[in-house]
Image: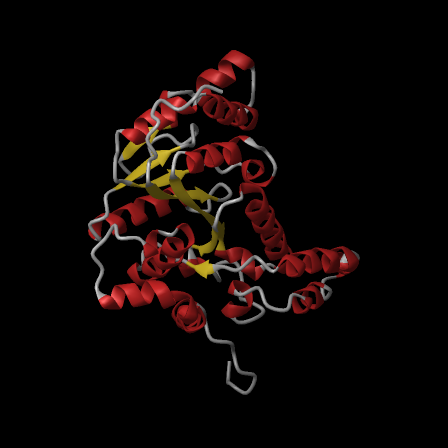
Amino acid sequence: MSSAPSGRPLRAFGQAVLGPPGSGKSSYCARVREALAGLGRPVSVVNLDPANEGPPYPCAVDVGQLVALGDVMAALGLGPNGGLLYCMDYLRDHLPWLRARLDALPGHYFLFDCPGQVELGTHHGALRDVFARMAGWGLRLAAVHLVDSHYCTDPAKFISVLCTSLATMLHVELPHVNLLSKMDLIEQYGKLAFNLDYYTEVLDLSYLVDHLASDPFFRRYRRLNEKLVQLIEDYSLVSFIPLNIQDKESIRRVLQAVDKANGYGFGAQEQRSLEAMMSTAMGADFHFSSTLAVQEKYLQPPEREDEEP
């Protein structure tokens, strides 16, 4: 791999926005870009997904200008998934192209809109290597991992989400913030079995296994589910922040967490009021109360047995 075109450190901050297809990564980048611009923070969105045509934000850097997914598929006879993995390998081998474009945006905060292929975050090495090189350039990143909040309504899918989130955290090797996206649609496919904080704080998962055991199909896999949740609890790494990108307060809470994760909140890049600095330093202490507020706003209250239908 050739060396970067500039020897000067970037001294920049940013977010690597990860998550499965349809989790809202591009919409997140668009809304967070607007929010940061409103704060007076210079911000640029970098599209690292060659399959993302016509993203909903002004694109400062587009990997499609380096390698086009359609050309790769046609030239090598690959499908969309294999072609995208090849594109990420190609980007890893041509990082001076990316470094030159980031150098042209001094002082900017970067949002990297990443591809949605799950294996890029769990075991394929290209994207992790790209992030590692960026760290070597002086770019301080936090990974922001989005998953669709309605998976909370299905215990089996939620366990799968926890496993995927944990694998991504261990593989990507960045400070990590997990988000439950589309919070306003959380009960679109059913009601939650427990309060929202049970899912955001990933509390005692044995209750979730017991809830799964009420289904005759999943009862056969109880031991497997017990081992999976034991693995998740043993690492004790996964928790979530609820997100509705249409809600400014929700975005503010996410930015507080991300700024703490990548270190931006402790820098001098912005003139902050005392209130803003205190909220950045203490924001995590209010996660529980803010989660209760989210539950009251977006979840239907449980039906009481003594109420008339």
> Quadrant of the rendered structure where residue 216 is?
bottom right
**Residue 65 location, x and y as percent?**
35, 21
Q: Position of residue 270 (x, y in %)?
A: 23, 53
Q: Is residue 233 left or right of residue 1?
A: right
Q: Residue furthest bottom?
A: 306
Residue at 72 percent across and 57 percent down: it is: 225
Give the percent coordinates (x, y) of residue 181. 44, 54
Residue lying at 49% horizontally and 44% vertically, measured from the top left: 19
Q: How many marks?
A: 0
| Side of 180 where 125 appears, left or right | right
Towards the viewer: 141 or 43: 141
Name the residue rendered at 40%, 50% in the picture: 262
Rendered location of residue 231, percent (x, y): 69, 56
Report the residue that reaches farthest toward the top.
75
Q: Is residue 285 above or below residue 39?
A: below
Q: Is residue 1 above or below residue 258?
A: above
Q: Is residue 102 above or below residue 183?
A: above
- Color scheme of the displayed model: secondary structure
Name the residue furthest front: 7
- Name the quadrant containing residue 139: top left
